[in-house]
Image (tube, rainbow, N blue to C red):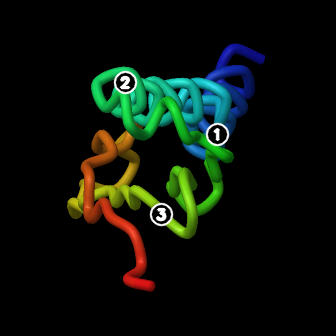
């Protein structure tokens, strides 16, 4: 019986992969984007929306700040937050 419990525990431990809840990563990403807005009054003044799916802040007339996340190879089974968002570009389309 003890051997069976050990085998079952081993199977459960190897088949379960821990992952951070999406809400944790979304909160970190949103903090970066809101921090950008707070540090740029012209963006805050003309803010239209925050697209958390595409990491884009829309403001003013056809202006946007785009963010990206660097992808880093991680070892198999690695669990933890993704790299933080970084500003890719910020500006308005010329008229």
At label 3, counting other C-alpha atoms closer than 10 Å, the crowd grade (few under 14, some 14-19, many 20 or more) is some
The residue wearing badge 2 is 35
- Work out whether mark 3 precedes mark 1 in sequence or the reverse, and give the earlier one: 1
Looking at the rendered structure, which numbered label has been put on residue 16?
1
Task: Report the residue at 57% width, 63% height from top.
Answer: 61
The residue wearing badge 3 is 63
For the C terminus, the quadrant is bottom left
Q: Is residue 61 left or right of residue 1?
A: left
- On the image, the x and y values in percent for residue 67 come to 37, 56
C-alpha span from label 2 to label 1: 35 Å
Task: Report the residue at 67% width, 28% height from top.
Answer: 23
- On the image, the x and y values in percent for residue 51 come to 64, 52
Q: Quadrant of residue 65?
A: bottom left
Pick out the residue farthest to the right: 1
Pick out the residue farthest to the top: 2
For the residues labelled 3 and 1, say whether their Cβ atoms are less than 8 Å apart: no
The reply to whether residue 63 is in sight is yes
- On the image, the x and y values in percent for residue 64 come to 46, 61
15, 76: nearer the viewer? 76
29, 89: nearer the viewer? 89
């Amino acid at each position: 019986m003890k051997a069976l419990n050990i085998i079952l525990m081993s199977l459960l431990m190897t088949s379960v992969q821990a992952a951070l809840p999406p809400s944790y990563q979304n909160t970190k990403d949103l903090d970066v984007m809101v921090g950008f807005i707070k540090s740029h009054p012209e963006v805050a003044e003309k803010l239209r929306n925050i697209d958390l799916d595409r990491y884009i802040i829309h403001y003013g007339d056809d202006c946007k700040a785009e963010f990206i996340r660097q992808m880093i190879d991680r070892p198999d089974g690695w669990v933890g937050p993704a790299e933080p968002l970084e500003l890719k570009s910020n500006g308005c389309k010329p008229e």
